[in-house]
Image (spheres, grey):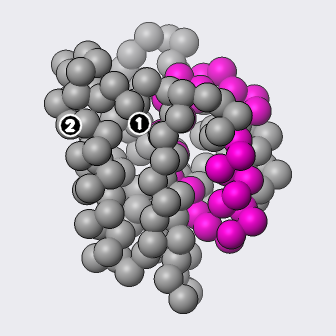
Amino acid sequence: MKQLIFVLNGPNLNMLGKREPGIYGASTLSDIEALCRAEAEKLGAGIEFRQSNHEGDLVSWIQEAGEKNAAVLINPAAYTHTSIALHDAIRAAAVTLVEVHLSNIHARESFRHHSYVSPLAKGVICGFGVDGYVMGLRALVKAAAPQ
């Protein structure tokens, strides 16, 4: 059976390619989706690729992933630093999750150094731009493989 991975993207990531390209790069969210779909195919995994500017959508999708026994690759964007709701959803859904960020959040403003998601993540990838998504997909597939 094909492993299912939800690739979830938080607020303002729909603005990639336009928003602060010096920080986030020139790739659009559509570019990242195409990259993720190609990598998932190579890995033999299926993906659900989604983005929302609304916290409740992300919470519902995490719950859905849990119901479908799917893993989650998430770029929570600004909700990383503010959302106890995402933290609680991840904990309740008991999903295997990798947190990803395009920029190195630890080299930026101090308010970006804390994550409500990281304590529940299998791992965190930040600072590698769009390649972080590929790294995250590979890590999730490997984590789900029988040892």
Residue appearing at x 54%, y 12% in the figure: 111
Say which label, 2 or 1, has the lower sequence index. 2
Magenta range is 59-85
Rounded to the nearest angstrom, the CA distance separating label 2 from label 1 is 14 Å
Seen at 46% across and 65% down, the residue is: 47
Task: Residue under label 1, please give it.
Answer: 101
**Residue corresponding to mark 2:** 27
Name the secondary structure under disc 2: loop
64 or 119: nearer the viewer: 64
Is residue 1 on the magenta stretch? no
Residue 146 percent location from the top left of the image: 55, 87
Between 125 and 76, the one nearer to me in the picture: 76
79 w.r.t. 35: above or below: above
Horizontally, is 39 left or right of 120 in the view?
Answer: left
What is the number of callouts on the image?
2
Q: Residues within 10 Å of mark 1 (few under 14, many from 20)?
A: many
Q: Amino acid at mark 1?
A: His
Q: Quarter holding the C terminus? A: bottom right
Location of the N terminus (image quadrant): bottom right
Q: Give the numbered dot on residue 3.
A: none
The residue drawn where x is 70% and y is 58% is 64
Identify residue type, mark 2.
Answer: Ser
Question: Is residue 72 highlighted in magenta?
Answer: yes
Q: Is residue 19 left or right of residue 100?
A: left
Q: x, y (%) of residue 49?
A: 45, 53
Q: Looking at the picture, how far across and down is residue 105, in whole percent? A: 42, 25
* SS state under label 1: strand
